Image (cartoon, rainbow, N blue to C red):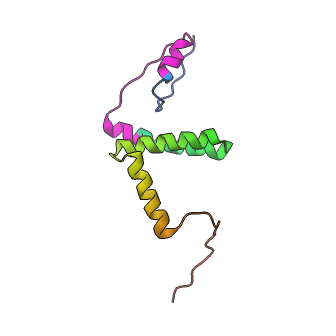
Amino acid sequence: MKTITYNKLVRDRIPEIIEAKGNTCIIEVLTNEAYLKMLDAKLTEELAEYHADGSPEELADLLEVIYAAAKARGISPEELDRIRTEKTDKRGGFDKKLLLVSVTEN
């Protein structure tokens, strides 16, 4: 028998998937404060995985964590999208592929 320690935030069905394979796991339910910290760590983890892989699945994982972080902070997916749209309307998107090289201030 081998025990692997993870101490990381996982999707809700992961414990049942682990147990369906005949393994056992120890889980704990986080406080709201700890959950927010772990969500931030999960964003970093998922972004690193996307950088390494570049797959659509990793982008989807990033979105899932972003939606969870928003929800944990009281922001609905609709509100998040409204905020995103407002910013796009005011400042534009990234469609033009612009790189700001420098600014000379007067």
Residue 82 figure quarter: bottom left
Q: Residue 58 location in percent, x, y? A: 60, 40
Q: Quick one: 38 or 4, which is closer to the camera? A: 38
Q: Residue at x 66, y 42 (%)?
A: 55
Q: Quick one: 29 or 78, which is closer to the camera? A: 78
Q: Quadrant of the N terminus?
A: top right
* Residue 95, above or below 46: below
The magenta stretch spans residue 24: yes
Q: Is residue 97 left or right of residue 78?
A: right
Q: Residue at x 59, y 63 (%)?
A: 94
Q: Residue at x 57, y 13 (%)?
A: 21
Q: Quick one: 81 or 25, which is closer to the camera? A: 81
Q: Residue 29 location in percent, x, y? A: 36, 27
* Residue 64, above or below 28: below
The magenta stretch spans residue 38: no
Q: Residue 18 location in percent, x, y? A: 53, 17
Q: Residue at x 49, y 64 (%)?
A: 88
Which residue range is magenta in the image? Answer: 15-37
Q: Is residue 82 left or right of residue 5?
A: left
